[in-house]
Image (tube, coloured by chain):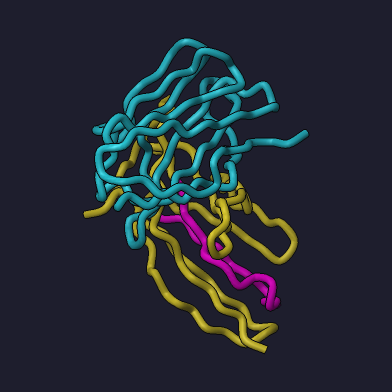
Chain colours: A cyan, B yellow
């Protein structure tokens, strides 16, 4: 049981390049999330998904796209990377509790992205 | 005002000390509250959920004060291994899937 995994662990991009970050979970969780963490800002929600085939915008979605074609995978894409997207990206997943109340989020180890 | 606010610290305490952190939140409709722990350059991990009546897990005690809109975390008999950043997490509103993370309070336990 690997939990939540993320690939790659670290990447350097040039401005304008594109890339996809992959998140996979083996806990059969319905909900998945992408966050970015910057110094002094805390974790901010980029996009999230409440089930296979569905995605929704979070607090800071601009410049990112996501897809959830399979329940266990949640992809985060950067079409044209900018230096402002230099950050640590965390994926998380959770299952739904009773009454729609969210339960614990389990995080992946993170992807460190540097955009030059 | 930030939706979730924490004192960034650092709190430098000797081993064996008791230390407490507070976290205030702005949305009175928030229903779910958590404390996460994050070690340097690692992912956040759940420390404990916070229940209305307060709850304890070993040396850790969490409290919720809805009237004043804050949650607290008390750590007794601090260990060197407790050194980390503690994140306060609040759900944005009842029934939503969005959680707001505080920027964290850094704790350093000194030998």
Position of the N terminus of chain B by quadrant? bottom left
Residue A67 on image: x %, y % = 43, 19
* Image-quadrant location for residue B104: bottom left
| In-front residue for pair B54/A3 | A3
Residue drawn at the location 64% of the way across and 29% of the way down: A25
Residue A23 lies, in percent from the top left, at 55, 32
Kindly identify the residue that appears in the image at 52 percent across and 31 percent down: A22
- Residue B68, visible in the rendered structure: no
Residue A38, position as x, y percentages in the image:
36, 55
Residue A54 magenta: no
Residue reaching furthest to the top = A53
* Residue situated in front as seen by the camera: A4 or B75: A4
Residues A40 and B71: in front is A40
Above or below, B103 relative to B100? below
Boundaries of the magenta span: B68-89
Q: Nearer the viewer, residue B3 or A62?
A: A62
Q: How many marks?
A: 0
């Amino acid at each position: 049981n690997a939990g939540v995994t993320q690939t790659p662990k670290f990447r350097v991009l040039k401005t304008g390049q594109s890339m996809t970050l992959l998140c996979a979970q083996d806990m059969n969780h319905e909900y998945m999330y992408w966050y970015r963490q910057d110094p002094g800002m805390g974790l901010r929600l980029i996009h999230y998904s409440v089930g296979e085939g569905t995605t929704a915008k979070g607090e800071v979605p601009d410049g990112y796209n996501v897809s959830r074609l399979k329940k266990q995978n949640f992809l985060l894409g950067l079409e044209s990377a900018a230096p402002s997207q230099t950050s640590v990206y965390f994926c998380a997943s959770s299952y739904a509790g009773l009454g729609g109340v969210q339960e614990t989020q389990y995080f992946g180890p993170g992807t460190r992205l540097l955009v030059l | 005002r930030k939706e979730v606010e924490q004192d960034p610290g650092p709190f430098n305490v000797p081993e064996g000390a008791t230390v407490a952190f507070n976290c205030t939140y702005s949305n009175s409709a928030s229903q779910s509250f958590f404390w996460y722990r994050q070690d340097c350059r690692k992912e956040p991990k759940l420390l404990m959920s916070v229940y209305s009546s307060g709850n304890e897990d070993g040396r850790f005690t969490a409290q919720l004060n809805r009237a004043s809109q804050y949650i607290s975390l008390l750590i007794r008999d601090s260990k060197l291994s407790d050194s980390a950043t503690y994140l306060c997490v609040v759900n944005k509103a009842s029934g939503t899937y969005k959680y707001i993370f505080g920027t964290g309070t850094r704790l350093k336990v000194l030998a």
